[in-house]
Amino acid sequence: MTATKLSVTMTKSKFGRLPRHQACLKGLGLRKINQTVEVLNTPENRGMINKISYMLKVEEV
């Protein structure tokens, strides 16, 4: 079974957000608006993505 990857793009600023939401961005490796990273589709990453879904655009790779 191969783990699929997700392409995650930050669409909104991290400033003025809750500290836990900022920590989720850091955990996913996102620092700038419109930055895109590829992460594995694991329950841990999926949880961080669900928590800050209003700031992200997610596509399956």
Image: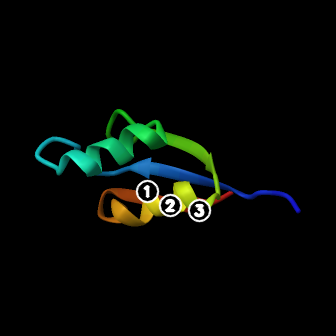
The Cα atoms of the two marked residues, 2 and 1, are separated by 12 Å
Q: Of marks 2 and 1, which one's residue comes earlier in the chain?
A: 1
User: Which SS class for mark 3?
Assistant: helix
Label 1 SS:
helix
Q: Position of residue 55 (x, y in %)?
A: 31, 57
- x then y, percent, for residue 1: 88, 62
In what element is the residue under mark 2? strand
- Where residue 48 is drawn, which disc sits there? 1
C-alpha distance separating marks 2 and 3: 15 Å
At x 30%, y 64%, the residue is: 54
Q: CA distance from mark 1 to mark 3?
A: 9 Å
The residue that appears at 27% across and 44% down in the rendered structure is 22
Crowdedness near tag 1: few (<14), some (14–19) or many (≥20) residues, C-alpha within 10 Å: some
The residue shown at (53%, 54%) is 45
Q: Position of residue 3 (x, y in %)?
A: 77, 57
Residue matched to label 3: 43
Horizontal arrangement in the rendering, residue 56 relative to residue 16 (left or right): right
Badge number at residue 58: 2
